[in-house]
Image: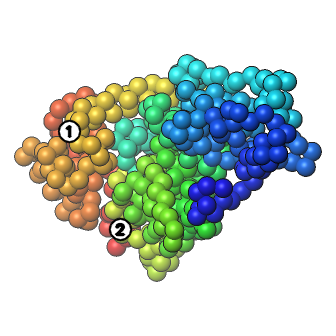
Amino acid sequence: MAPADIRKEGAAYDLTLAIGILAASNQIQSENIHQYLIMGELSLDGSLQPIKGVLPMAIKAREEGFQYFILPKENAKEAAIVDNLEVLGVNNIMEVINHFNGDEKIEPTIIDTRAAFYSNLDVPEFDFANVKGQESIKRCMEIAAAGGHNIILIGPPGSGKAMLAKRLPSILPPMTLQEALETTKIHSVIGNTKDQGLMYHRPFRSPHHTISNVALVGGGQYPKPGEISLSHNGVLFLDELPEFKREVLEVMRQPLEDRDVTISRAKFTVTYPCSFMLVASMNPSPSGYFNDPNSPMTSSPQEMQRYLSKISGPLLDRIDIHIEVTPVPFEKLSEERKGESSMNIRKRVTAAREIQSQRFSEFESVHYNAQMSVKQIREFCKLSEESLTLLKTAMEKLNLSARAYDRILKVSRIICDLANETDISPTHIAEAIQYRSLDREGWLG
């Protein structure tokens, strides 16, 4: 099968080969078979099983000028996303044979992609309205979402770090149709989109800390996307960050910077996009109760240093916001009043993203504040004398590291955008300084 120099894998060619044999032996009429792309896995009884990677196949079929795409019924919705291609979903090989012989035509699957997309932008599954207390943390996550900033949550077990992280996608701006197509293509490659069609909501991925390098960034003999690519246009949540192997975290540094990952093999190279927000969480110490006056569980300075040193400086350089999460008191938990909904927060986040879009309209690779280079920070984050004095005092008094300087400027810029103000004020700087916990003396030394 052409191209012969590329080895084929998987069972998706079963139906292709079977129909090819039937056509070559004149058991079916094959005058217009060249207009069809035919893919599917055959069972021994002739029924068809769903296959992976259908959306990229359909896009390629349209590019190559095919008019029809025959594939398993379960995959038809996904392929029908592509315009100008007639998608024919079938249950078994007899339906294909009857179709070519003119005995029974297969009805095409038709989906109005745009109408389906916009009708599914509904209320998210996880809503900040159900979060009791934690107002300062919700504010911090709003800032992170608005500026596309990576964030790390530091707090004892049971303080709600994972619960808060799961709700972050609900306040991110809705995906555009182009983003939805990109995301669906990636998930299609590993078979995550069977009988689903287009992905309407931003992905949230939360791999276990025992994950391998290949599973995180992608790879294998026949390269497949890893968790960072499956998080494209969404959120990657790494719970208990220090528990991940250090080498696993280190291979993530380059993709975080470049927002794509390239996997090379002897005969070919594959590049997968991975533009995602990183949300990490960690206990403040091995015992989990550092600086907690209500807990007798403490850790020695040596244990603290060993625990925190699992996270490298270069990785922390790529995390703009550090925030401490404290347990919610009983009085707050027992309140019946709901908090602000994710939809309301999302409106402010979307408005701030629009401001950034206008600001960076001349830059092709920069869309929001987190992506700013040092040169752009100097251009767009200019400070008044009063703001500069405050920042200098804070860095000296709190013993903030040099890496904190640019991060504070970027975060203060998005706080300013959320307030719909033009100039960064001392108030914006003061709030941004709060979000650098791990740079303070006593954490990483």
The spot of residue 388 in percent (x, y) is 12, 50
Which residue lies most toward the bottom here? 302
**Picture disc at residue 79:** none
Quarter of the image for residue 65 reads top right
Q: Which amino acid does label 2 sit on?
A: Pro
Picture layout, residue 340 above or below residue 38: above
**Element at label 2:** helix
Res. 334 in view = no
Residue hosting label 2: 314
Name which residue lies at 27% across and 35% down: 356
Q: Marks 2 and 1, how far apart in space?
A: 29 Å
Residue that appears at 82% across and 36% down: 28
Question: At 20% across and 55% down in the image, what residue appears?
Answer: 374
Name the kind of residue labelled 1 in the image: Glu
Image quarter hosting the C terminus: bottom left
Residue at image point 58% right, 64% down? 5
251, above or below 273, in the image: below
Circle 1 sits on which residue? 362
| Front residue of 296 and 43 | 43
Q: Is residue 189 visible?
A: yes
Question: Could you classify mark 1 by the number of other residues whose Cα lies within 10 Å: few (under 14), some (14-19), or many (20 or more)?
Answer: few
Image location (x, y in percent) of residue 416? 24, 36
Is 229 in front, or is 318?
Answer: 229
Image quadrant assignment for residue 46: top right
Locate residue 124: give its quadrant: top right
Q: 89 and 324: which one is in front? A: 89
Q: Which circle, 2 or 1, is nearer the viewer?
A: 1
Q: Position of residue 24 (x, y in %)?
A: 78, 46
Task: Give the structural element (helix, strand or loop) at label 1.
Answer: loop
Q: In which quarter of the image is the N terminus?
A: bottom right
